[in-house]
Image (spheres, rainbow, N blue to C red):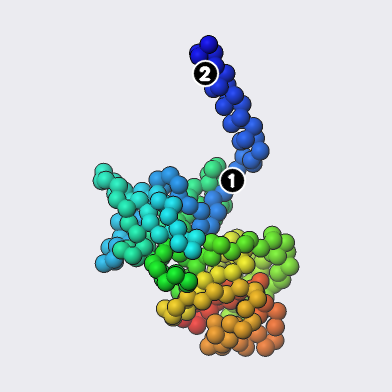
Amino acid sequence: NATKMKHESGFSAMIFSIIVFSLFPAKISAQQGMAATIPVKGYVVLAGGDTLTGMVKWSLKYVENNPVEIKFTEPGGKARLLNAGEIKGFGNIIPAWSADDPADIDTGFQHYVSVTSLKKSVPVFMHRILAGRMTIYQNRSSANLSATVSVERTRIDGIGFTWDPGEGLTIGPTYRTDYRIIESRNRYTSYFISKGNNPLIKVEKDNYEENFNTLFSDCPAITQELAKNPDLGKFKNFMVLAEVYNRMCP
C-alpha cells in the first residue's frame, strides 16, 4: 500500500545517504574560491566605499566562470541581489565541514573584487588571493597542480627574504607568511594579474618566462637574487616572488 511504499522509499534514501557520506573523509576543508551555495557570514563593499556585514549567498550566475551576482541580507533586513556592476566587492566565509582543527587556513574570509573580465570585458567578481601593487586573482578555470610540486621546492635565502617549504616566507625582520598559505595560493596552473591597476593579464607556466620581466624587473631585491639563483625564476616560485615584490618593492 501507499504507506508501506513511503516507508520503504524513506528507508532507501537513508541507506543511500549513509553510503554516500561513507565515501568521503570525516574532515573536508573549504577550498579556495568555493561557492557559497547557502547563506554564510560575509560583507559587501558598496560603490561609495561603505562596508556592510550580513549573510552572503551566491546566485550561481557566472561569466567566464566568475560569479556576477550575490544575494546579500543585512541583520534583520530583506535579501537583495547585488551584481558586480554596482558594488566594489564582497567577502564570505566558507566553513570546513568539520571545524575542529584551528590550524586550517581556508576557513577565513575569501575576498572577491569587481573587475572587468578578460575576454568579454564585463564586470565580474574575481577571487583575490593576493593584494598589493601586484594583485593576483584566482583563475577558477585553472587546473590544480600536483601536490608533489611542493616536495620539489627547496629553501631560498634571498636578499632580505627567506623561503622554506616547511617554515614559510620571512621578509625582513618582522613579516612572515605561513607556508600553508603559500601552498594554498600556489596550487594553480594559471592566474589573473593586475600590476599597478593595469588591465588583467593571464600568467601561466607556458608564458611565465616572457612575462617575468614585466612582473618583477623593477624590484632589485628579486633581480639581484635571480642572478645567483636562477631557480627562483621558475613558475613554481611565482607566489613567493609576488609576495616579496609587494612587501619589498611596493
Q: Position of residue 198 (x, y in %)?
A: 44, 80
In the image: residue 79, left or right of residue 154: left
Quick one: label 2 or label 1, which is nearer the N terminus? Answer: 2
Bin the neighbour count of mark 1 within 10 Å (Cα to Cα): few under 14, some 14-19, many 20 and up: few
65 w.r.t. 60: above or below: below
Q: Give the answer, above or below, for where 222 lies relative to 72.
A: below
For this orientation, the residue located farthest to the front is 1
Quarter of image, res 202: bottom right
Provide residue 24's location: percent of width, then percent of height.
Answer: 64, 40
Estimate the x, y position of residue 250 in percent, counting from the top left.
46, 81
Viewer-nearest of discs 2 and 1: 2
State the SS at label 1. Answer: loop
The answer to whether 78 appears left or right of 31 in the picture is left
Residue at 54% x, 82% y: name it.
215
Please state which amino acid type lies under the numbered disc 1. Answer: Ile
- For the point 53% across and 11% down, which residue is it? 1
Locate residue 243 relative to residue 58 in the image: left or right: right
The residue labelled by disc 2 is 6
For mark 1, what is the residue?
28
Q: Residue at x 64, y 82 (%)?
A: 209
Amino acid beneath label 2: Lys
Which label is found at residue 54?
Answer: none
Task: Give the Cα separation between the discs numbered 2 and 1.
Answer: 33 Å
**Place of residue 161 in the rendered image (x, y in percent of width and height, measured from the top left):** 59, 77
Asked whether 219 or 138 is in front, the reply is 138
Does residue 129 show up?
no
